[in-house]
Image (tube, helix red, strand yellow):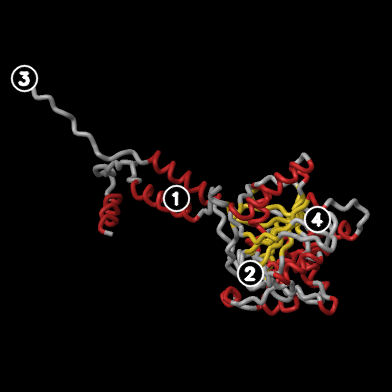
Amino acid sequence: MAEMTTSDSGSHKKGGKKVRSKKMSTRVDLTAMVDLGFLLITFFMLATTMNKPKTMEVNKPAKEDIDKKDEQPIKMSKTATLMLGARNKVYAYVSPDAIEAGTEISLDSLDYSPTGLRKFIQRRQKEVQEQWGDKDQLFVMIKPLPGSNVKNIVDVLDEMTINDVKRYAILEPNDPIDSLIALRTGQSRK
Amino acid sequence: MPKVKIPRKSTSVDMTAMCDVAFLLLTFFILTTKFRPSEAVTIDIPASTAQIPIPDKDIMMFQIAPDGRMFFGLDDQNTRLKLLDRLSTQYQLAFSEDQKKAFRLLETWGMDIRSLPEFLDMEPEKRAGFNQPGLNIDTTGGQHQVEDLILFSRQENNNLRIAIKGDKTTEYRHFDKLIQALQNRKVNKFNLITSAKTAQE
């Protein structure tokens, strides 16, 4: 305020000594601005989520395809069935081509670790390789029981990718063998 | 001998360039940041070795909570509005402009479609704290609410991809209901959302 009045009085004086305003440097101290800038950068860097979630594509056979049964049924000896149960259990079996009275099916109770499920799939791939000369002939049927959870399905689908299983499908556990296994292992089917 | 005088240099550095860089980076981060949308429920997604990143747009997302509650979300606000129009004719619900505006900003929701107007009338703060009961997937009485959502959304946007975000511990029976609904609408291809697994072979 005081400065205002002095400059005012100066302008009134005509013909007096010209009042030269002091030349000010145009430089501004930018330190504070840079500080602020980097602070905000830090905030946005930390707030950005860098790892985007990934997706896993699932293809289900169309319902009409299931209904029409004119296709050649796949040989059971090329298959492996995985039943996903509650409490992180997988029940794996191979059904024989033809079921007779004396047929016995060996049932493996596995977990999702590399030594469990992965071993089974690799063993089965080797068997199919020996029998049919091509391990890609293996067809894995994934049958989740109601008690299994989403993580189990993701894990199984992951194993398919890891072991390079070309053919697999998520199916309903509606085979008589499935019912029997569910009953024997105490897994609910509803 | 004359004394060699070292001229005193100013310690202040020109900050202009540094400031430029700082704000350039700041602009970059502001523009690329996409804040995580508010979610109706926290979902802990399972990890997998899948490498495909989730697409940026045209996503129809279903979320399934561990207790089986299901939530629905579209990423595009215009598609959301179109969907609401379709729902209002299908379910004979009249939505006011305010309700439409609220729905347009709704990232995910899960409730019976017929209780939507009531939900949209709530104050935003109250709405955020409201415990949503989940979509009505029950098909008794010939109603197909989830199927309708799938059908209408896809009719409004042909390129929609369907993503399912299920919690690790969601039981398959909840998951199966959704898959049945999708397959009833002839959707046989969908994406499961997973997080990247840290390498352990």
Answer few, some or many: residues within 10 Å of disc 4's Cα (few below 14, many 20 plus, some between 14 and 19): some
Residue marked by disc 3 = B1
Disc 3 is attached to a residue of which chain? B
The mark lying in front, picked from 2 and 1, is: 2
Residue marked by disc 4 = A96
Secondary structure beneath disc 3?
loop
**Residue at left offset 13%, top offset 27%:** B5
Share a chain, discs 2 and 1? no
Q: Position of residue A25 (x, y in %)?
A: 31, 41
Secondary structure beneath disc 2?
loop
How far apart are labels 4 and 2 at the CA level?
39 Å
Q: Position of residue A5 (x, y in %)?
A: 27, 57
- Is residue A175 or residue B59 the one in the foreground? A175
Q: Relative to B134, say whether B25 is above or below.
A: above
Q: Relative to B34, say whether B3 is above or below.
A: above
Q: Amino acid type of disc 4?
A: Pro
Disc 4 is attached to a residue of which chain? A
Q: Earlier in the sequence, mark 4 or mark 1?
A: 1
Share a chain, discs 3 and 2? yes
Q: Position of residue A34 (x, y in %)?
A: 38, 47
Disc 2 is attached to a residue of which chain? B
For the N terminus of chain A, the image quarter is bottom left
How far apart are labels 3 and 1 at the CA level?
54 Å
The mark lying in front, picked from 3 and 2, is: 2
Answer few, some or many: residues within 10 Å of disc 1's Cα (few below 14, many 20 plus, some between 14 and 19): many
Q: Are marks 3 and 1 in contact (CB under 8 Å)?
A: no
Secondary structure beneath disc 1?
helix
Residue marked by disc 1 = A41
For the C terminus of chain A, the image quarter is bottom right
- Is residue B19 or residue A167 the one in the foreground? A167
Residue marked by disc 2 = B65
Residue B56 is at least partly visible in this image: no
